[in-house]
Each structure stands twice: as structure tokens, then as C-alpha cells.
Amino acid sequence: MERKPDFKAQITYFSSYKSGLTSPFSSGFRCVLRFPFINKDFFCIQNYIDTELVFPGENVTTNISVLDNIKDLYKGLDFELFLNTVKIGEGVITEVYLSSSST
């Protein structure tokens, strides 16, 4: 079952040198989000717009579905991306979809 996205974001993945990751990410990639105002990790699914593969060091626009309820999302909010305990990138919300405001 495909989840509706909660928001659109611009993400910058760190280079292989900084993150240690060498393989590309495909649409449907799952990782952990951390927001500056919440002391909790959120699992998410990323569906890339206009591409299927993203390599370390690239910037991408993506739709993100959060696998937990989260409130107080807004355009311009920044976040960090983690894979296990490794920080792999940073992003900023560019659009919040209506479905996320009711969760």
C-alpha cells in the first residue's frame, strides 16, 4: 500500500567522504528524520521527483512520507537524515501537503 506524502523537501546528501556511503539511493529509500524541535526520530520513505537514483553528494527534490504522526511541520523547516547512527544528509521542507496537517 502506497502512503500519501506528508511534505516535499529539498535534500542534500553528504558526499561519500563525509557520510561513508558509496551506493546510490533509489526512490522508496527509508531512513530516519530528526527535526530540531522534537527529541524523537521519525522513520520515513522518500520518493524522488524526476529521478529514480540519487548518489552521495547530490541534491534532490523528494516527497516524504513519515511513518508516524507528526505535527507542526511548516515550509522552511530544516531536518537531518540518518541511516542508523550516521548522518547522511540535510534537508528543508519546501511544501507541506494538507494530509499532514490533520495528523
Image (cartoon, rainbow, N blue to C red):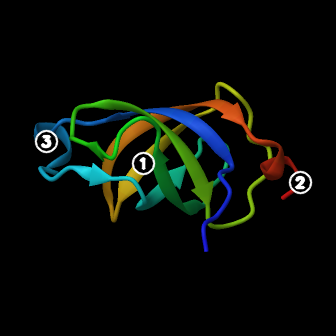
Residue receiving disc 2? 102
At label 2, which amino acid type do we have? Ser
Dot 2 or dot 1: first in sequence order is 1
Local SS, label 3: helix
Q: In this view, does 76 lie above or below 50?
A: above
Q: Is mark 1 on a helix, strand or loop?
A: strand
Mark whose residue sits in front, 2 or 1:
2
Give left or right: position of 103 versus 56. Answer: right
Reading the image, the residue beneath label 1 is 81
Q: Distance of mark 2 from mark 3, alpha carbons?
A: 38 Å
Query: Which quadrant holds the C terminus?
Result: bottom right
For the point 70% across and 28% down, the residue is 75
Residue labelled with disc 3? 16
Q: Residue at x 57, y 61 (%)?
A: 42
| Mark 3, other Cα within 10 Å: few <14 / some 14–19 / many ≥20 | some
Task: Look at label 3 and name its amino acid.
Answer: Ser
Given residues 11 and 79, the one toward you in this image is 11
How far apart are labels 1 and 3 at the CA level?
15 Å
Q: Distance between the residues labelled 2 and 1?
A: 24 Å
Q: Looking at the picture, how far across and down is residue 69, in whole percent?
A: 74, 63
Vertically, is 98 above or below 85? above
Q: How many marks?
A: 3
Residue 37 image label: none
Under circle 2, the secondary element is loop
Measuring from the top left, give residue 21's x and y in whole percent. Answer: 16, 51
Q: Residue at x 13, y 42 (%)?
A: 16
User: Contact (CB < 8 A) between labels 1 and 3?
Assistant: no
Closest to the camera, between mark 2 and mark 3, is 2
Label located before the other in sequence (1 or 3):
3
Q: How crowded is mark 1: few (under 14 residues within 10 Å), some or many (20 or more)?
A: many
State the image quarter where residue 48 is shown: top left
Is 41 left or right of 13, judged from the image as shown?
right
